[in-house]
Image: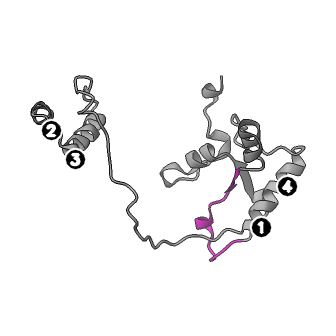
Amino acid sequence: MRLWAHRIASQGTVHKRLLSVYKKLAHLQNWDTTTLSPEELEISAFEGKLRKLFIAHRQREAKFRAAKIHDTLKRNAGVVKCEVPGCEFNFHQVYGTIGENFIAVHDLTPLEESIHPGKKTTIYDLAVVCSNCHAMIHRGGECRPLDTLIKQHAMS
């Protein structure tokens, strides 16, 4: 496929779809792409197509989220930071006013584990976490514990 991409490129045309597939395969196979020209390495895609999704989504209470953030502010002298040990990211400190009181609220017990259509939750069942940690907690559809999310050697 690589030779075919080179032949097409030498004729002055680049088949973008073929090149895209080649690059994906190259990435998966750790192929050497250093010999490809800048034109061959050009990445493009058509984006923005509207599609409708129908999903089941567990309801969250916005007021409850706000209550957790308010409680965190009270307990931490007006500071909201990620509660994942080793992270402690503070959006306000990094982004200024726009980041004030911005944080994700994570349910320590996944809602899907509830045997009822809903479950009673208190603010102590929640944690405030930064967006990166929240994504890593749930990456791959899992719900990882906060205390083991960040490896100890990564903090040194």
Precedes in sequence: disc 2 or disc 4: 2
Give SS at disc 3. helix
Res. 17 mark:
3
Marks 3 and 1: in contact by CB < 8 Å?
Answer: no
Location of residue 143 with respect to 149 vertically, above or below? below
Give SS at disc 1. helix
Q: Quadrant of residue 15?
A: top left
Precedes in sequence: disc 2 or disc 1: 2
**Residues under labels 1 and 3: Cα distance?**
47 Å
The amino acid on which the numbered mark 2 sits, given as a three-letter code, is Thr
Res. 71 mark:
4
**Residue appearing at x 55%, y 51% in the figure:** 138
- Frontmost of labels 1 and 4 is 1
Reading the image, the residue beneath label 1 is 63
Give SS at disc 4. helix
**Residue appearing at x 29%, y 30% in the figure:** 30
Reading the image, the residue beneath label 2 is 13
Marks 3 and 2: in contact by CB < 8 Å?
Answer: no
Q: Quadrant of residue 37?
A: top left
Precedes in sequence: disc 1 or disc 3: 3
The amino acid on which the numbered mark 1 sits, given as a three-letter code, is Lys
Location of residue 92 with respect to 46 vertically, above or below? above
Residue lying furthest front: 12
Per the rendered image, the range of residues in magenta is: 103-119
> Residue 139, how many percent across, how many down?
51, 49
- Frontmost of labels 2 and 4 is 2
**Residues under labels 1 and 4: Cα distance?**
12 Å
Marks 1 and 2: in contact by CB < 8 Å?
Answer: no
The amino acid on which the numbered mark 3 sits, given as a three-letter code, is Arg
- Frontmost of labels 2 and 3 is 2
> Residue 143, how many percent across, how many down?
58, 53
Location of residue 102 with respect to 114 vertically, above or below? above
